Image: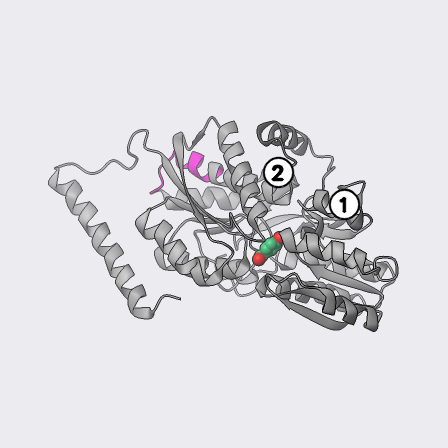
Amino acid sequence: MLTSSRRLSRRSTLKLIGGGAAAGALIRGFPAPAIAQGAPIRVGFMLPYSGTYASLGKNIDQAFRQLVAEHGDKLGGRPVEYVTVDDEAAPPKAPDNMTKLVSRDKVDVVVGTVHSGVQMAMVKIARENNTLMIIPNAGADAATRAMCAPGIFRTSFSNWQPCFPMGKVMADAGHKKVVSITWKYAAGEEMIAAFKEGFVKAGGSVEAELLVPFPEVEFQSYLTQIAEKKPDAVFTFFAGGGAVKFVKDYHAAGLRKSIPLYGAGFLTDGTLQAQGEAAEGIQTTLHYADDLDVAADKTFRAAYQKRYNAEPDVYSVQGYDAAALLAVGLDAAKGDTGARDTIVKAMQAAKINSPRGPISFSPAHNIVQNIYLREVRKGKNAFVRIAHEALADPATGCRLA
Ligand code: PHB
């Protein structure tokens, strides 16, 4: 963490820089143009490009660039320049990484990140500096609840959104006593809490909540505890490399047949090739599936496969929509990044035909979207049904509206 004196001095430095620029424009005798002709929009990617979430960061980055390419390589009529920072999904490094993008590289918009703990440090700095920021994954509930801000938008989900509907899904499947297991950090704990809220409301009870230190993947002792407790089912959140290992270990421990495994859809998204047979039949809830009957998805998937020679996943869709949302804002302002009110108003009102289906934005600037029940069939997250249509986060404590 930055000390408070360093934070103060950063603020005063920013003030000085701002004053200096204005004085420079006056000395030259004419006001600085709002947009330097043809100057690129500077997009700062703060994403994990290494570690257990590396593939998530890469897919967000790739699909964002895909949309910009499909948009004539421009946003708001201006070319786009990228600055990338590998945040390593490491919260202690987050303040320095974010400060570098905002104060040193002076990007026009920050696109990031994946890990909820890293995100909260970014939200704090974005609020201090009035930074325009689009969250393309991290679900930290507070980012669009108590810590919401005019310049902060999210094109992914709040941790609550994909998990709350699973409570009813599992209760309807006849499960009464469930054990949960996840990583011990904000995303895992908030997702379990959301699932529990829905499950208890539907008459179920969570008998034990197992927590694994992040990003550890030694699951044996936890699997032994699950076998001993013999719950009706298990609900879990793991993602990326950790999800691959958990699903394989659960299968290898012989638990799949006796204790069905459910999860937030991250458990099986972008991971199925590596999980293979071990993932077949797992049911999850998420805002995407591999076979949606959505025209925009067919175009998106074909273009992504062609461009990257790889299958897109939910993270790609979230990155793609981050660029689509930014395009709406910057097109409305004709590329003038100084016209913040115009940008924010247009983004708030955006209605986008996303590959995941129709999306819009709540007054708290969090995405409103369908949550789908999916089942892994032949290596794909197959659509089963809509678990909750157009679900908005409760946005408790956000005073933007
Ligand atoms: C998070 O930390 O918010 C997070 C990370 C990976 C996911 C979902 C949420 O797949």
The answer to if 331 sits in the magenta stretch is yes
Q: Nearer the viewer, residue 177 or 273?
A: 273
Q: Is residue 171 left or right of residue 184?
A: right
Number of the label disc, if any, that sits on residue 384: none
Label 2 belongs to which residue? Answer: 354
x and y percentages locating residue 52 in the rendered image: 58, 53
Number of the label disc, if any, that sits on residue 276: 1
Q: Viewer-nearest of labels 1 and 2?
A: 1
State which region is magenta: 328-338
At 30% from the left and 65% from the top, the residue drawn is 6
x and y percentages locating residue 291 in the rendered image: 74, 37
At 76% from the left and 69% from the top, the residue drawn is 200
Question: Could you tell me the amino acid type at mark 2?
Answer: Ser
Q: Nearer the viewer, residue 86 or 381?
A: 86
**The image quarter in which residue 320 lies:** top right
Q: Is residue 263 above or below residue 204?
A: above
**Which element type, helix, strand or loop, lies under badge 2?**
strand
x and y percentages locating residue 99 in the rendered image: 36, 55
Residue 324 seen in render: no
x and y percentages locating residue 136 in the rendered image: 54, 48
Cα–Cα gap, marks 1 and 2: 28 Å
Image quadrant where one finds the N terminus: bottom left
